[in-house]
Amino acid sequence: MMKNFIDLRSDTVTRPTPAMRKAMAEAEVGDDVFGEDPTVNALQEKVANLLRKEAALFVPSGTMANQLSIKSHTQPGDEVIIEVSSHPYNFEGGAGAALSGIQFQCLKGERGILDASQIEEAIRPADHHFPVTKLICLENTHNRGGGSIYPLEKMAKIYRLAKSKELLLHLDGARLWNASVAMGIKPREYAQCADSVSVCLSKGLGAPIGSLVAGSKPFIDRVHRFRKMFGGGMRQVGIIAAAGIYALDYHLERLKEDHQNAKRLAVGLKEFKGISIDPKHVETNIVIFDVTHTGMTGSQVAEVMKKEGVLIHAFGKTQIRLVTHLDVTAEDIEKVLKAFKKVFR
Ligand code: TLP
């Protein structure tokens, strides 16, 4: 979060609150590579329990959580079915190919959401010409889909399909907390529809660092080995895990406020000339809209808004993404709308 700006570029820009910093300063720590950091162990247990999985492992980032999961589920040459605008396919530096030697088969979803029938058609037959379909990856909420929520029944149907075809399912749940709070559905209910789940503490929850992977004990054991291999084993990292525990205890329910703020933004933006947005598509804390009819590119809009004290993220040529979070108040949202009004009235 850049000082004196209202920063809507991402929910990753939050800074730890004084109370969170206090929890960090007071954290009991040990060497986590020896498995001796009590705070890390407590966080892992807490998240495994929230997701009702046998085990969970703390990792530095959401990217590492996803990629360790892909690595642990597949062999080089395997195929992974994924949505075309998903995070692991687009925004993780080509890691799936580089680190796991997998290939993605990309399907187009409705704001990121796939249907079981689409996936069923994409599963390869058992024929030596084809790669082996091994894994399905879903994303809930879907970032590029505009924070869209996977309906639980859709996930359940896809998971039943996966099991009937002996496939594995990984859920990128970087913002699963947002889906859960918005729908009043427990994280574990979503997690039930996946073999592995990655969740992030450093997005809407407002912790500075950290993600977890959860799954069965043998799966987490493999993830643990690869985490070591990739250099993600950390030492007295309880100091960071403490922020995660604090975030889960105090920042989960308040995600509702971010969702209200995002909705307010969308409804306000709709009134401005040249901005195309459908507020009913804003389900959580992400607002994506098109600026083609303003005659400006996304980056030009971002430039202009920066002069007004608002930081926003241009996505592609004509799209803008705004993300609400812990460090943005309802008052800030009104200021942002005023700034937009000044430019686009
Ligand atoms: N997303 C970031 C950027 O990388 C785009 C953001 O600002 O939204 N899964 C999903 C669905 C994500 O949105 C992200 C981060 C990740 C994984 C990766 O998490 P990190 O940044 O911790 O590696």
Image (cartoon, helix red, strand yellow):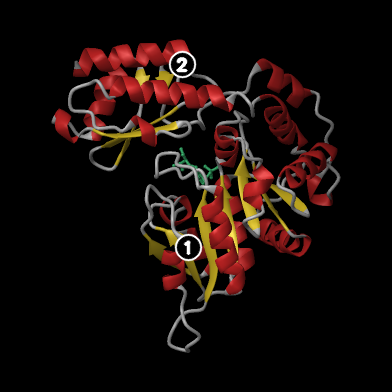
Could you tell me which secondary element the residue under label 1 belongs to?
A: helix
Q: Position of residue 130 (x, y in %)?
A: 44, 83
Q: Nearer the viewer, residue 180 or 68?
A: 180
Q: Position of residue 325 (x, y in %)?
A: 51, 25
- Residue for point 20% across, 19% down: 344
Q: Position of residue 254 (x, y in %)?
A: 60, 23
Depth-wise, is mark 1 or mark 2 nearer the camera?
1
Cα separation, mark 1 vs mark 2, equals 45 Å
Say if 295 sits above or below 142 in the image.
above
Could you tell me which secondary element the residue under label 2 belongs to?
A: loop
Q: Nearer the viewer, residue 171 or 14?
A: 171
- Residue for point 43% across, 25% down: 262
Say if 216 sits above or below 213 in the image.
below
Q: Residue furthest left?
A: 295
- Where does label 2 land, which residue? 3
Q: Amino acid at mark 1?
A: Ala
From where the camera sits, is residue 1 visible? no
**Mark 1 burial class by Cα count in 10 Å: few <14, some 14-19, many 20+:** some
Q: Amino acid at mark 2?
A: Lys
Marks 2 and 1: in contact by CB < 8 Å?
A: no
- Where does label 1 land, which residue? 116
- Residue for point 24% across, 32% down: 276
**Quarter where residue 326 is shown:** top right
